[in-house]
Image (spheres, rainbow, N blue to C red):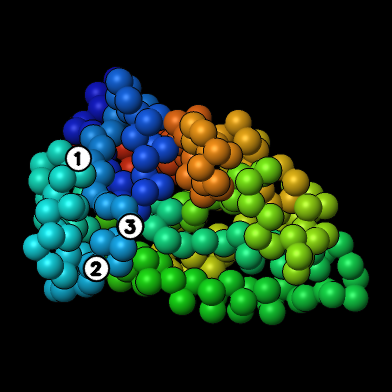
């Protein structure tokens, strides 16, 4: 029977949203398939102070480089795709909730119908405006690591009502309607050789909100509708491990 070769080298890159995966991984190893995980990211405005240089993500100043290095177990001060087999962009300031709110709202009213082609172009234009998605495109184009993308999760129910004034019928969106929107995101990202990790359906409620069970501690008290807990991180990990399975190599394949 073939034996597993070396673990898949994975980097999870992002802003404060990587915390949910760090919570989920606490005291746990990824073994099916075997994965060596590194994190590279930071919180706040420092996340915006990075850019592409010679195919790598490089902080723009020493303070930012120190912030990123502090998150990484090996003190990496830049991110090169050829150092890894796969890189997951987690959150990374890339929000999709307004797209879902508008599309789900329109889906409840025939007069507001948008064709599939128009929706695809809206998604493409939205992603083109996301700086981190541009980084993902550049990494994917190098063909050195598999690039995966998990956008920022939907806002937590009961804390945020940010789109209900303009898209009130979005709360009536169904699982099938959400799946159709995710399918368009998946198609658009696949054109860039990027693998989408959509938000797990079991975590979604009221159209395009995240269920309160996945909120961080004292989220309501702090008014934090954005960040999620370790239970949410575990859902992302399940999707991630399924996506990484094809990268697993036996000793014979690696030879």
Horizontally, residue 159 falls left or right of residue 82, namely right
Disc 1: CA contacts within 10 A as few (<14), some (14-19) or many (>=20)? few
SS class, disc 2: loop
Q: Are marks 2 and 1 in contact (CB under 8 Å)?
A: no
Dividing the picture into quadrants, the one containing residue 147 is: bottom left
Q: How many marks?
A: 3
- Give the x, y percent position of residue 249: 28, 37
Instruction: Give the answer, above or below, for where 170 lies relative to 212.
Output: below
SS class, disc 3: helix
- Give the x, y percent position of residue 14: 34, 53
Q: Which residue is mark 1?
A: 254
Q: Residue at x 39, y 58 (%)?
A: 92
The mark nearer the N terminus, 2 or 1, is 2
Instruction: Give the answer, above or below, for where 197 lies relative to 23.
Output: below
Which is more toward the observer, 251 or 29? 29
Q: Which residue is mark 2?
A: 49
Per the rendering, the mark at residue 44 is 3
SS class, disc 1: helix
């Amino acid at each position: 029977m073939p034996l597993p070769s070396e673990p898949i080298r994975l980097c999870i890159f992002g802003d404060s949203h990587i915390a949910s995966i760090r919570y989920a991984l606490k005291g746990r190893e990824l073994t099916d398939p075997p994965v060596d995980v590194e994190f590279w990211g930071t919180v706040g405005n420092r996340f915006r102070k990075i850019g592409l240089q010679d195919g790598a993500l490089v902080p723009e100043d020493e303070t930012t480089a120190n912030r990123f290095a502090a998150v990484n177990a090996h003190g990496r001060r830049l991110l090169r795709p050829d150092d890894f087999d796969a890189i997951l962009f987690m959150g990374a300031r890339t929000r999709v909730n307004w797209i879902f709110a508008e599309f789900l709202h329109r889906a409840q009213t025939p007069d507001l119908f948008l064709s599939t082609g128009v929706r695809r172009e809206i998604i493409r234009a939205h992603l083109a405006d996301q700086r981190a998605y541009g980084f993902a495109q550049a990494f994917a184009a190098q063909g050195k690591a598999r690039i995966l993308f998990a956008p920022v999760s939907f806002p937590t129910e009961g804390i945020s009502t940010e789109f209900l004034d303009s898209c009130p019928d979005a709360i009536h969106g169904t699982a099938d309607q959400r799946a159709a929107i995710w399918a368009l995101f998946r198609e658009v990202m696949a054109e860039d050789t990027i693998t989408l990790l959509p938000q797990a359906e079991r975590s979604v409620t009221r159209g395009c909100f995240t269920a309160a069970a996945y909120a961080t501690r004292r989220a309501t008290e702090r008014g934090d509708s954005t960040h999620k807990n370790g239970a949410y991180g575990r859902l992302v990990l399940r999707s991630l491990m399924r996506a990484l399975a094809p990268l697993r190599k036996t000793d014979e394949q690696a030879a």
